[in-house]
Image (cartoon, helix red, strand yellow):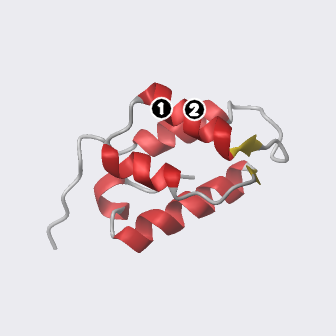
Amino acid sequence: MFEFRSDDYGELQRLVDALFAPGVSSRATVSKIDVLVRAEAYDLCDDLAEVVDLLPSGSFTRARLCDQLNSILVGHGWAGVYGTVE
């Protein structure tokens, strides 16, 4: 099976890692606005910007943010192209 990886593969993982630095409590949260602002600063490609835009409103722990992003990626069929996050 042929799988294409974008040059932007792993960019969402970089975004999540920046929002939740190593050693931060697993209970720490970020808001959708925090994610949007950081994504804007990273100048994500249009597809990944759409993924971030599709996040529901509210606050996210790292685990919940990753679940939401991965669900959106899988729903669009982009998990193999852009990678999933953890």
Tell me the element at label 1: helix
Residue 41 falls left or right of residue 18: left
Q: Are marks 2 and 1 in contact (CB under 8 Å)?
A: yes
Residue 18 falls left or right of residue 25: left
Residue 84 falls left or right of residue 8: right
Q: Amino acid at mark 1?
A: Glu
**Residue at left 14%, top 68%?**
2
Tell me the element at label 2: helix
Disc 2: which residue: 37
Q: Which label is found at residue 12?
A: none
**Residue at left 30%, top 41%?**
8
Category of crowding for the residue at label 1, using alpha-carbon neighbours closer than 10 angstroms: few (below 14), some (14–19), many (at least 20): few
Disc 1: which residue: 40
The image quarter in which residue 28 lies: top right
Q: Amino acid at mark 2?
A: Val
Q: Closest to the observer: 41 or 64? A: 41
Q: Closest to the observer: 70 or 55? A: 55
Determine whether 61 is above or below 28 in the image. Answer: below
Give the distance between the C-alpha atoms of the residues marked 2 and 1, in whole angstroms: 5 Å
Give the percent coordinates (x, y) of residue 18: 59, 31
